[in-house]
Image (cartoon, rainbow, N blue to C red):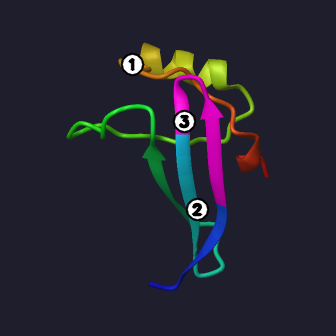
Amino acid sequence: MGMSVRPRIAVDQPGYVIRETVLEVADSATLLNLLQHLDRPCAVPGEAVIGLTVSDIDAVIAACAQAGGEVKTPATEVPEHKP
């Protein structure tokens, strides 16, 4: 599919144990993240995981809540993803 593997990431924090593979689409800024949670069951149908790089995560969470969204898992900083 023309993708290349970028970093493989392991996070081992209480309540957030993951293994992640980041794929880059044909030397572009488009990334596909494959994420496996090792400390909880598989996602239920309809669950979505969204990854964002923002300057003010608290403001983004507040805006999402104001629009009717709900945060099920607190925001987690993943330094390996910083540009």
Q: Which residue is mark 2?
A: 22
Across and down, in percent, residue 13 comes to: 63, 28
Q: Which residue is at the front of the view, 64 or 70?
A: 70
Across and down, in percent, residue 30 comes to: 57, 66
Decide if residue 16 is on the left or right side of residue 43.
right
Main secondary structure of the magenta stretch: strand
Q: Which residue is mark 3?
A: 17
Which image quadrant is residue 58 in? Answer: top right
Cα–Cα span, label 1 and label 3? 21 Å
Magenta segment includes 12: yes
- SS under mark 1: loop
Decide if residue 28 is on the left or right side of residue 80.
left
Across and down, in percent, residue 29 comes to: 64, 67
Cα–Cα span, label 2 and label 1? 26 Å
Label 1–label 3 contact, CB within 8 A:
no
Three-letter amino acid code of the residue under disc 2: Val
